[in-house]
Image (spheres, rainbow, N blue to C red):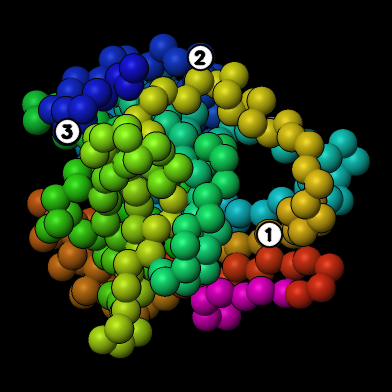
């Protein structure tokens, strides 16, 4: 049973007790320094539990993290042990700041175009559910690991058609929808069983929403994350694929992003919303190189 249940936006999440390794105050201070958080905090300050737990800070931490750490799997190919340590990940830091947070599982849609039938992978993608505001108990979806199509900021866990947030540029938007699984039996009824993150890239009048991934509210335990990294694959493309992505700020779209922050989240932080994020994603395989987005 999901900790958020079917009334996700009104549920009071339990404190973290999900088995994920929590970051130490020293690790948190090091992480804040690494990502360039605007204010300095000591270990004593962090351990006292008085770090400003706000929606605004959640926005800042999400954006800074996506910029500071590239998404790449080179260590799996070129490292000596072919292992990536997931313990210092963004999720552990958020757990340490926001006690009302837990993780869920998503399945990436590999179809490239909106008109194509979705081709989902298994539930191995991790997302976060965070309640950063005391009182209203509103839940936000947070994801810094999806790559080029993923959200660049938290998005309210709601399928309201007006719940749309701007992505990495004014022409990119994200929303959430709900629906039954495509593989469900026709006799299973119209129950809405899974969420979908969708992206719209405005390239003209014919632009359509595309499913980035589907996800569930079921709790994703640390053991699931560990075991999902062990797999036997006979797909040569996946086994030999090399992914490398880096994001950075550009001075364009400053006003657009700040206005969007004001409209959707009750205030913006101009210092860290001064530009948009542009990205380059390269997926190198034996027979082709695929690039998405403008070059850095």
Mark 1, secondary structure of its residue: strand
Q: What segment carries the magenta color?
A: 289-296
Q: How many marks?
A: 3
Residue 256 located within the stretch drawn in magenta: no
Give me the C-alpha separation between circle 2 and circle 1: 29 Å
Residue 157: x %, y % from top left: 24, 41
Residue 192, located in which quarter of the rendered image? Answer: top left
Give me the C-alpha separation between circle 3 and circle 2: 24 Å
Quarter of the figure with the N terminus: top left
Q: Residue at x 34, y 58 (%)?
A: 198
* Residue denoted by label 1: 243
**Of marks 3 and 2, which one's residue comes earlier in the chain?**
3
Residue 52, located in which quarter of the rendered image? Answer: top left
* Residue denoted by label 3: 9
- Given residues 230 and 188, the one toward you in this image is 188
Q: Residue at x 59, y 32 (%)?
A: 88
The answer to whether residue 222 of the structure is visible from this angle is yes
Residue 147: x %, y % from top left: 52, 58
**Of marks 2 and 1, which one's residue comes earlier in the chain?**
2
The answer to whether residue 93 of the structure is visible from this angle is no
**Of marks 1 and 3, which one's residue comes earlier in the chain?**
3
* Residue denoted by label 2: 19
- Given residues 287 and 11, the one toward you in this image is 287
Mark 2, secondary structure of its residue: loop
Quarter of the figure with the C terminus: bottom right
Residue 9, located in which quarter of the rendered image? Answer: top left
Q: Which mark is residue 206?
A: none
């Amino acid at each position: 049973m999901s900790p958020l249940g079917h009334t996700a936006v009104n549920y009071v999440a339990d404190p973290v007790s999900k088995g994920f390794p929590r970051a130490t105050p020293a690790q948190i201070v090091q992480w804040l320094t690494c990502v360039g958080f605007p204010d300095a905090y000591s270990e004593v300050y962090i351990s006292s539990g008085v770090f400003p737990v706000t929606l605004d800070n959640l926005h800042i931490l999400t954006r800074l993290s996506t910029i500071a750490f590239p998404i790449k799997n080179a260590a799996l190919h070129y490292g000596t042990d072919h292992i990536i340590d997931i313990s210092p990940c963004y999720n552990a830091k958020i757990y340490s700041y926001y006690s009302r947070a837990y993780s869920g599982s998503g399945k990436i849609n590999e179809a490239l175009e909106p008109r194509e039938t979705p081709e989902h992978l298994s539930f191995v993608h991790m997302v976060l559910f965070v309640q950063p505001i005391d009182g209203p108990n509103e839940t936000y979806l947070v994801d810094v690991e999806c790559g080029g199509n993923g959200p660049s900021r938290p998005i309210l866990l709601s399928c309201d058609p007006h719940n749309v947030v701007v992505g990495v540029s004014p022409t990119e938007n994200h929303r959430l929808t709900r629906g039954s699984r495509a593989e469900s039996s026709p006799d299973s009824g119209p129950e809405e069983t899974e969420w979908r993150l969708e992206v719209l890239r405005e390239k003209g009048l014919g632009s359509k929403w595309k499913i980035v991934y589907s996800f569930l509210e079921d709790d994703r335990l640390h053991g699931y994350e560990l075991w999902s990294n062990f797999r036997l694959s006979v797909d040569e493309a996946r086994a030999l694929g090399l992914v490398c992505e880096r994001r950075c700020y550009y001075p364009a779209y400053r006003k657009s992003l700040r206005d969007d922050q004001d409209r959707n989240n009750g205030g913006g932080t101009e210092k860290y919303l001064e530009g948009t994020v542009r990205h380059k994603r390269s997926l190198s395989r034996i027979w082709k190189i695929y690039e998405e987005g403008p070059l850095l």
